[in-house]
Image (spheres, rainbow, N blue to C red):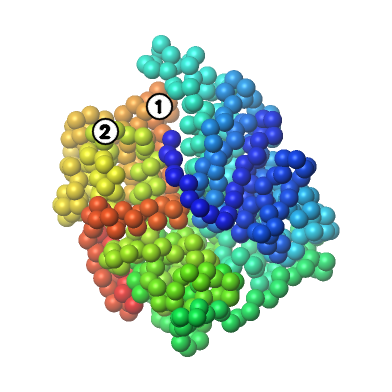
Amino acid sequence: MRTIPPRKTNYTFEYHTHGQTMDIGYSTWVSHYPTNNTIEGWRPINELLVPSTDLTILAIAPNGVRHYQPNDDPVFGASYQRDGFFLPDKYISPIGCIDRHAICNPNNGKYTHLMDKRGAIKNATDGQLGLNHAQFVAIQRLRLVLLESSSFRDAVWTRTQGFLQAQERVAGSAGLALPSNQWEIEMAALFDDTLVNLQYHVMEYVAGSSIPGNFETIKVWENMDTVNLWDNTSDTDKYPPPHLSHISQPAKQPTVAKQSPTSKQDTMSSTQHAWVVVEHGTPLQKIEIPIPEPTGTEILIRVTHCGVCHSDLHFWEGFYDLGGGKRMYAKDRGAKLPRALGHEILGTVAKLGPDADQAVPIGASRVVYPWVIRGVFSNGGFAQYVTVPHARYLVDYGNANPSTDCTFGCSGLTVLSSIQKLMPLKPEEPVLLVGAGGLGLACISMPHALGHKKIVTADISPEKLQAALEAGATAVVDSKAGEDPAKAAIQVAGGPFSGAIDFVCNKQTAEFALASVGKGGKVVTVGIMGGETAISLVPFTFGSKSLLGIITGTPQHLRDVSKIVQSGKLKAIPITEFPWDQANDALQRIYEGKVTGRFVLIH
């Protein structure tokens, strides 16, 4: 199980166990209010109390697990901890409360069940919880995220006593017995996966500042009812949020940012230029838009470098291929045009919001954690300026090459996170990387930097395979050569792969990766080329194989990648720089598949 050394933080995130339940407390913006065991209900930590925005959410699952482990939460900005107390599997039973979620107001200890749409809206609107405007909007956001997380509930059901009788089921029949802490391993991995999934959905569906400007923000979540993302019991009209006169409005944030005594804010005009998608599938247009004013803890960044990612191409096209002729359209997920693309951002601090961390000096150059600026629901790095919600999403890259490091803001943390999904692996166990594009090439040097020795890369482009060898791949395989490319890959590796990472993810590459891993092997899907494939379930089960999806990593992953880069252990991948005004050219070349390594726009 992966462990992360503790670090000092002002944010607490605690799970508190009641009998056979696991209470997972999230703070929506700033901090979590842990249970006071001597007093019934929730009590605030006074020095962290921000009553206009803070809530606590409980997700309860019947496993009696108590976790304490330091880690970063890229959405809620908190940390969570885990210790070693786990109930043996024989004491676990499905008791039907897996889908119980609740919103709790730490100021008065009252709560409402989040899954009960009628109750949640009624309790919020009639003042039962004493919620204000920002808190009510937070409820709407969190309901959507949690109702999207049914995979967690389903997975918990499979990990009850009928599933993990580890010693009894496996000993003597399939080699070594599973470890006695198998429940710990399963649930730790499950929760890590679920946390990333929740973060992904928050960032997919939530756009805007931590303190919404008006109740129009809520309409996005009401509209989601029409696509059955939650129970369609339409009581929203009975309790319309815009008429909640008793809910206090958050104080208006001042627009004049603080300045440190030794630094000055950037002097700038009120407008900027941005290359934006005006109509999906048509060339980007250069338009003039306002420069955002940082409020609260926000920081304004003047973009100097922005990577061009394949996911930018998908938004430019306006859809994702789901296979079978089905598509997922950006507009159906709440994305609006015009929109500036770009999430791989590096730039300089131009201005601080009134409550921003003064330790970040004006003019400092930083990499931006990409999943708070997606170039989908807010303007990204194809604009000249972007705002970042908090200084915690800015990472110092030291003396590293800025063009390389801005791409690691996306590729590096995704690669590190995907490699960790394959662990534990011995250094000599073979790993297959499918695709030698920007992510695939970045992934070659990362395992080497972490001490892994046997990396095989597969692609259909001779140029990319050569680039893979130059990047340090042990061997390469043409995944279209011969009748059975998986067999050829296994022969090159000297046996089936322990793990594979698919950076393409279409029908052909998925089938190739799944056929290449051996018993107990893991396939991690990262790419979003799209499509669908069929899996023969019995061999998949008998082979004890795992199929895992990953979309990103955490801010801590980005900090870890930055340290690896600065250590000199990570070999640079090919970078092609484009002047900012050639944004269309860079995007077109990615569309045509004419790219080796990564493309970066220079402002």
Residue at image coords 39%, 68%: 366
Nearest the viewer among 403 and 401 is 401
| Residue 398 x, y percent position in the rendering | 32, 64
Mark 2: amino acid: Glu
In which quadrant of the rendered image does the C terminus lie? bottom left
Residue at image coords 70%, 64%: 52
Residue 544 is labelled as 1
In which quadrant of the rendered image does the N terminus lie? top left
| Residue 75 x, y percent position in the rendering | 54, 56
Between the C-alphas of marks 2 and 1, the distance is: 17 Å
- Tell me the SS state at disc 2: loop
Residue at image coords 46%, 80%: 262
Classify 367 as above or below 445.
Answer: below
Residue 450, by quadrant, is: top left
Marks 2 and 1 close (CB-CB < 8 Å): no
Mark in front: 2 vs 1: 2
Residue 308 is labelled as none
| Residue 273 x, y percent position in the rendering | 43, 82
Q: Is residue 391 left or right of residue 103?
A: left
Residue 429 is labelled as 2
| Residue 128 x, y percent position in the rendering | 83, 55
Which mark sits nearer the N-terminus, 2 or 1? 2
Residue 131, by quadrant, is: bottom right
